Every structure is written in structure tokens, then in C-alpha cells.
Amino acid sequence: MVSCTHHQHDFDALRKASTRIVIAAGAESAGEMAHRAAVALAERLGRAPTAFPGGYGGFLGGEYGQTGAPEAFASKLREVLAVAAGQLDGDEAMDQPGADSMLRELDRFVGEWTMHATPPGGPPWPGEGRVRFEWLDGRAFLVERWTLDLPEPPVGTPTSGTSIVGRDAAHGTYVQLYHDDRGVHRVYEMGLRAGQWTLRRDGPPFAQRFTATFAADGKTITGRWEIAEEGRDWRTDFDVTYTRVS
């Protein structure tokens, strides 16, 4: 690692090289050392870095304890190589990095689910939620519609809502737009790596993050919502379990 960080590139030679040079940066590793290095290198060469799905180890599929997004990474790599070989227009590849594999990842949600939530340290809330995921506009967006049937919902708890998931094709990531019957609107960064689903937002009145795991058979999703008020540590908001109905 020390020898890596002290290496000095010959930027004049790189700029004059006849070989096409692509600087890759993990879409989910922004701010990390590997991503900062890729951005700095691309700037010195006078070009933009190419975003690859996943983090700096996006090609890994669980090896060495790291899970990236290997299918989406491989799809993006094939597109980059196709551009270099003149088989694909550069603008086309820029707009659709790993598009097919990203859509296939979302297929695991499609269908109807029940939803049960448990507050920290307490028994599960009585009643259940019903959730339906389905495609919109020919698989352009994934929509989630949910309702809660609780005899005595906690004060301030929404009882229905809609979320729409779209992909940021240029960066190989997802975005979720959220709305509920309280009139709350929020935007979440969404991740989907192997069997893990994540959501996160930073902003008033508090930051939120959600981490969930798909069961091996795809019939259960077990997750936890956490919140952090300004200046405070993360704390559990509630745990939630989705169980597939159809």
C-alpha cells in the first residue's frame, strides 16, 4: 500500500499514449482513498473518470469478505471494451452502464409482501402492512405501494405511501423517491449488492439509513431502520420483516 501511494505517474507519457486510457471509479466509494485517487488522476489527464457499479472492489462477489456488484461491473466493463473496439458509440455506453443487469437486480422485489415492524426493545406492533412492488412504463421505474393496518398506530406514523425507484445509469446507482399520507416527501440513495438492500438520506429533521438482507430463497427481507438527530449517534428506529406472498 505504501509503495502504491508514493508512485508518481508520468502524465506526459500517459497523455501521449496511443492506447485509450479509462480511469475507473467505484460509484459507491465516493470520498474514499481509491475514489479520490481516480478522480485526481482523471483530472491530471484532462478527462472524466468512468463510474463502475459498486465500490472500489465492485468486481468482487464475496471473495475475501467483500461483496461488490460483479454482474453490473462485468456489464459495464464489456461496454467500455466495446467502445474501445469501435463496436459501441461512446455516448450510448455512457448513458447505459450495466442497464440490463441493474434492472434484473430489481426483479427480486416484484410481487406482493406482508410487512411486520418491531420497535426497539418492544414486542412487534399489532397488525401488518401490505406491500406491492411492480414495474412502471415498460420497466423504466419500480414502484412500491404500501398500506399499514394497525389498530392503534403510534402517533405520527404514516399508514400508506408510495416510493418510486429509478436508476442513475451514468453512475450505476439507484435513487428512491418517497411519499406518504402525511405529506412527507424524501429522496434516498439506494444500494443493492448481492443480497443486501440499503437506503440512506442526510438532512433535516434527522438522517436515516436502512440496511436489509434477502433470505437465500428470496422470500424474506429482514431489515432495520436507524435515525440520527443532528449531533447525535445513530439509534434504531424499528426493525422490519417483509415476507413474500406472491
Image (cartoon, grey):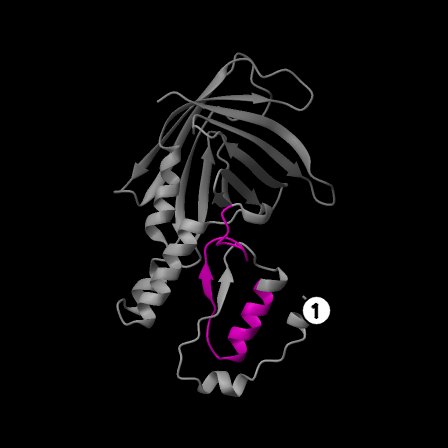
Q: Magenta segment: does it hold 59?
A: yes
User: Which residue in the structure is indicated by mark 1?
Assistant: 2
Q: What amino acid type should be assigned to the residue bearing mark 1?
A: Val
State which quarter of the image contains the C terminus. Answer: top left
Furthest toward the front, the residue is: 63
Residue 108: % across, % down: 39, 35
Residue 157: % across, % down: 55, 25
Name the residue nearer the viewer: 76 or 187: 76
Residue under the image location 53 percent in, 45 percent down: 62
The magenta region covers 35-61
Residue under the image location 59 percent in, 48 percent down: 64
Name the residue nearer the viewer: 182 or 209: 209
State which quarter of the image contains the N terminus. Answer: bottom right
Residue 39: % across, % down: 54, 69
Above or below, comparing residue 46 to residue 100 in the picture: below
Above or below, comparing residue 81 to residue 140 in the picture: below
Residue 12: % across, % down: 52, 87
Q: Magenta segment: does it hold 221?
A: no
Quarter occupied by residue 56: bottom right
Residue under the image location 62 percent in, 80 percent down: 8
